[in-house]
Every structure is written in C-alpha cells, then in structure tokens.
C-alpha cells in the first residue's frame, strides 16, 4: 500500500546523502557507536540524514561547520532514538543554535520565602520549551566517547522530557512501562545522590553531581551515562539503568563490552562536567 509518509522519507533520503567514506569517518570519530550491528548502523545513518534535513543548524559568528561536523552532531542526536519508532520524538523545535564557546545565560530562582534571585551563569547547553536547542561547540566536540559526558544527548533528553510539558524527569513512557516504577527508581537514586552531596559536597560520586540539581537534570545526566558510561550507571543505580533500558529500548552496556573486547581505548568519567 502506498504511503505518503514513506514516499516523503525516501525522497528526503535521495536528496540528502553521504558517501560510505563520510559515514565511516563519522563512525570512527564516535566511539560510543562501537558495537552497532549493520542494520542499526544503516538505520542510524538514515535517521541522521533525516534529522539534518528536518532541523536547522545555526552556527553563530566565530563558528564554521563542515559536513562532517553536522553528521557527527546528527548521529549523536539520533542514537537515543535508535530503538524507537519514528514518531516525532524531537517535535516542538526546529533549530539547533551553535555557539563557538560557552555562553552566559540569565538564571532566576524563587526561594521558599518567595524572594526571587537572578544571576548570569555560564552554560554549554540549554533546551528551551517550545524553543531551540542551544549547544556550545566545544561541548559537542568533547562528546562522543565512552566517558560519561555527552552534551548532545543531555540537551535532547530534556526535549524528550518536555514532550509531557515542563521538564520534570518524566518523559512519555511506552505502553507497558509503569509510571510508579519509573518514579520509584528515579526518586530513590536522586535522593541517594543528594544525601551523598549533603554529607560532603566534595565527595567523588559515581555519576556527575550535576544530576542532583533537580529531577529534569537527573534524567538528562543519567541518559548521558546510559549511552556513554553504561557500566558506571549500572553500578551506581541499577534500577535507573533498567528503566532507561526500557524507555530507550537499547542496551548500550552490551555494545560497550563488545567495544572493550576489541581493544578500543576507554576514557573514564570525570565528575563535575556540567552542561
């Protein structure tokens, strides 16, 4: 049966292509893609091209992007969706704004007594509700390894979270997943991380302490670790790993072990990297 959606998809892929050499270079530059099967690689390749066709990448003055740069960004953006059906998971925004360096962002906070505090903070990424994703290019360049840091995945996890409204650490779960089990796993881990930091702000936590900021950041940071340091996340919070495994419908730990068995180098996560 003829499908307009499938026809449009194929038409887009015919218009936006990369050579086998370009794709191989992208895979070589992104260790966290190690272990993908041939079918998964092909799916990621196609979805990366569709992402670049659908989204606008806007580099600000001082930054120039090559086709290779764009492909690296798109492949990391699409990796979290690789096990999911194409259902418009990244709807609600059409632009990624790319800064040549970290940027200053105005922040506001109302304390329990009702007093509003405002300040400027330096960030490497932001995701605005019903707005663009903002990324500092040095953070994108630092992403892509098995080291527990991935700015692209972090900010796009916020966009998944926002599909239910304001980011609160609860993306739209699949049928068969339990909101109660999700909330229990995430809350217990979030509380445990905060207990560690309350006892000693300088403690060397297994995952980045930035995850303790709020439930939205906890989901974004643990999504980073799920794809780029799955063994660390499983060690720290196994129930969180299992919930993310059910949500993303992937098992990056299996790919990491395959990567390590082939002798690929591995960097270890460093606490304190903040988007």
Image: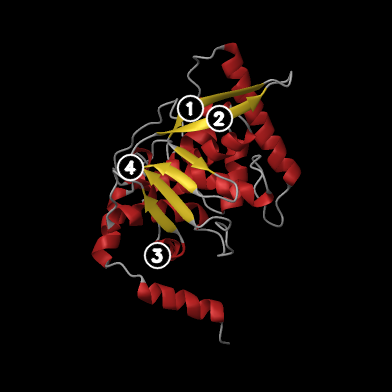
Marks 4 and 2 sit apart, C-alpha to C-alpha, by: 25 Å
Marks 3 and 2 sit apart, C-alpha to C-alpha, by: 35 Å
Marks 3 and 1 sit apart, C-alpha to C-alpha, by: 34 Å
**Looking at the rendered structure, which numbered label has been put on residue 121?**
1
3 vs 1, front mark: 1
Along the viewing direction, whichever of 274 and 191 lies nearer the viewer: 274
Q: Residue shown at 71%/39% (left/top)?
A: 183
Q: Residue shown at 73%/48% (left/top)?
A: 178
Along the viewing direction, whichever of 265 and 150 lies nearer the viewer: 150
- The answer to whether residue 83 is above or below residue 237 is below
Residue ID for mark 2: 107
The answer to whether residue 108 is left or right of residue 225 is right
Marks 1 and 4 sit apart, C-alpha to C-alpha, by: 21 Å
Residue ID for mark 3: 49
Q: Earlier in the sequence, mark 3 or mark 1?
A: 3
Q: Position of residue 215 (x, y in %)?
A: 63, 34
Question: Residue 200 lies in what quarter of the image?
Answer: top right
Per the image, label 1 sits on a secondary structure element best described as strand
Q: Earlier in the sequence, mark 4 or mark 3?
A: 3
Q: Residue shown at 28%/56% (left/top)?
A: 68
């Amino acid at each position: 049966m003829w499908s307009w959606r499938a026809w449009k998809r194929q038409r887009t892929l015919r218009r936006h292509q990369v050579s086998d050499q370009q794709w191989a270079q992208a895979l070589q530059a992104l260790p966290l893609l190690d272990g993908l099967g041939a079918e998964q690689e092909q799916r990621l390749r196609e979805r990366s091209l569709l992402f670049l066709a659908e989204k606008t990448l806007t580099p600000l003055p001082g930054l120039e992007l090559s086709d290779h740069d764009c492909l690296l960004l798109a492949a990391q953006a699409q990796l979290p969706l690789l096990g999911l059906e194409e259902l418009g998971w990244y709807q609600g925004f059409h632009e990624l704004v790319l800064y040549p360096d970290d940027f200053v962002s105005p922040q506001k906070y109302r304390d329990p007594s009702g007093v509003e505090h405002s300040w400027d903070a330096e960030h490497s990424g932001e995701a605005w509700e019903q707005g663009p994703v903002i990324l500092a290019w040095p953070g994108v360049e630092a992403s892509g390894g098995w080291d527990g840091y991935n700015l692209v995945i972090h900010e796009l996890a916020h966009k998944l979270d926002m599909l239910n409204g304001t980011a609160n650490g609860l993306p739209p779960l699949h049928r068969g997943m339990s909101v109660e089990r999700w909330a229990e796993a995430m809350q217990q881990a979030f509380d445990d991380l905060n207990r560690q930091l309350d006892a000693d702000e300088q403690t060397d936590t297994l995952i980045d302490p930035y995850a303790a900021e709020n439930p939205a950041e906890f989901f974004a940071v643990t999504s980073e670790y799920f794809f780029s340091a799955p063994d660390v996340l499983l060690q720290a919070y196994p129930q969180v790993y299992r919930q993310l495994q059910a949500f993303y419908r992937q098992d990056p730990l299996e790919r990491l072990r395959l990567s390590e068995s082939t002798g690929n180098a591995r960097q270890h996560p460093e606490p304190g990297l903040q988007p």
